[in-house]
Amino acid sequence: MAFEFFNNNGKFFKGNLHGHSDLSDGKLTPKEVCRSYVKKGYDFISITDHFLGMFNYPIAVPELNIENFTVIPGAELHTSKMGNGELWHMLALGLNTKFAPPPQPNFLINNKSEDIESLSLRLSEAGAFVSLTHPEWNGMTLQDTLKVKKVHAIEIYNHGCAIECDRGSGIAVLDQALNQGKHLNIIATDDSHFHIDDAFGGWVMVKSEVNSAASILEALKNGNYYSSQGPDFKNIKVKEGQLEVSCSPVEKIIVSGYGSASIYKNKSDMEAAVFNLALLPQKKWLRITLIDKKGNRAWTNPIYDY
Ligand SMILES: [Zn+2]
Ligand SMILES: [Zn+2]
């Protein structure tokens, strides 16, 4: 069952999976980016610079002597083009310098670029954890999403896009894709560039035995994590038609499912709730959302067998 990882050995490590340095269009050097996240108590990050010819296809892994802090090699890749004629943006974590870049010199649409099916397949064969980014910001549709066969996750929240233009959500396209039977996990990220206050707003909590790039990547690929802007899940159990959730104090716990199906509990400083799953009769998928007093959310990955 997909929530068993709460009871696995190890602990939860906090990380940002999407951010930029001055190797592409960010403000800070890779080392300064790392130090900013260390100061805020993060256990790991990936610096995912724009993987374009104009930046010399960067993969930032700065040499740091910071104990208990991991940098996962990664990049934000681009290729032409989505249904609306815009460039694809896609995160790949665990990317190796030997990965052959798609022929995408800059942010302009380029008809010689690799198609998305081929790029996502190559990334997945290279062992990367692959995610679709900021669907609301660049108008990614359900049809676009379904075209990408090999993808682990989609951003349910992109903090930079929320701050800059109020287009930070990925919920609409995520839930439609789940309704179509696509299995997709969820990530919340910063997409920090540090030109404005666009960091520390969305992260993942990954259950892993150790804080190493290999172990965290494995846990990400297995879906052993949740995403947050603040609240924390403590445990989740599904048994005999009931769903038990325990968490940090929140005001609302929502279970969403196929189509318009959803159930919720509303109470001040709630730290646990039990749901009757007979109220979600479609049994196709469900995912859980927490909302705290400040309006900050946390999200589980979807499960399909309940
Ligand atoms: Zn992007
Ligand atoms: Zn980005």
Image (tube, helix red, strand yellow):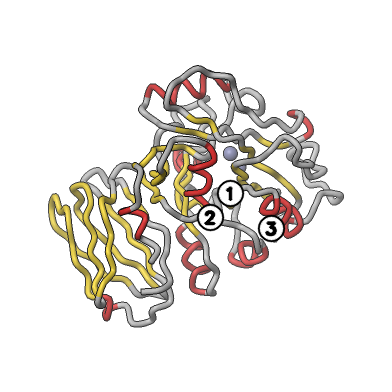
- Residue 153 circle label: 2
Mark 3 sits near ligand 1, with its Cβ under 8 Å away: no
Mark 2 element type: strand
Q: Mark 1: which amino acid?
A: Phe
N-terminal of the two: label 3 or label 2? Answer: 3
Mark 1 element type: strand
Task: Provide residue 125's location: percent of width, then percent of height.
Answer: 70, 53
Tag 2–tag 1 contact (CB < 8 Å): yes
Q: Mark 2: which amino acid?
A: Ala
- Horizontal side of residue 188 vs 276, given as left or right: right
Instruction: State the separation of the CA atoms marked 3 and 2.
Output: 21 Å
Q: Mark 3: which amino acid?
A: Asn
- Residue 84 circle label: 3
Tag 3–tag 2 contact (CB < 8 Å): no
Quadrant location, the C terminus: bottom left
Of residues 82 and 221, the one nearer the viewer is 221
Q: Quarter of the image holding residue 25?
A: top right
* Residue under numbered circle 1: 129
N-terminal of the two: label 2 or label 1? Answer: 1
Q: Where 39 sits versus 1, above or below? A: above
Task: Give me the residue at 58% from left, 31% from top.
Answer: 20
Task: Give me the residue at 74% from left, 48% from top.
Answer: 79
Task: Provide residue 42's location: percent of width, then percent of height.
Answer: 40, 31
Quadrant location, the N terminus: bottom left
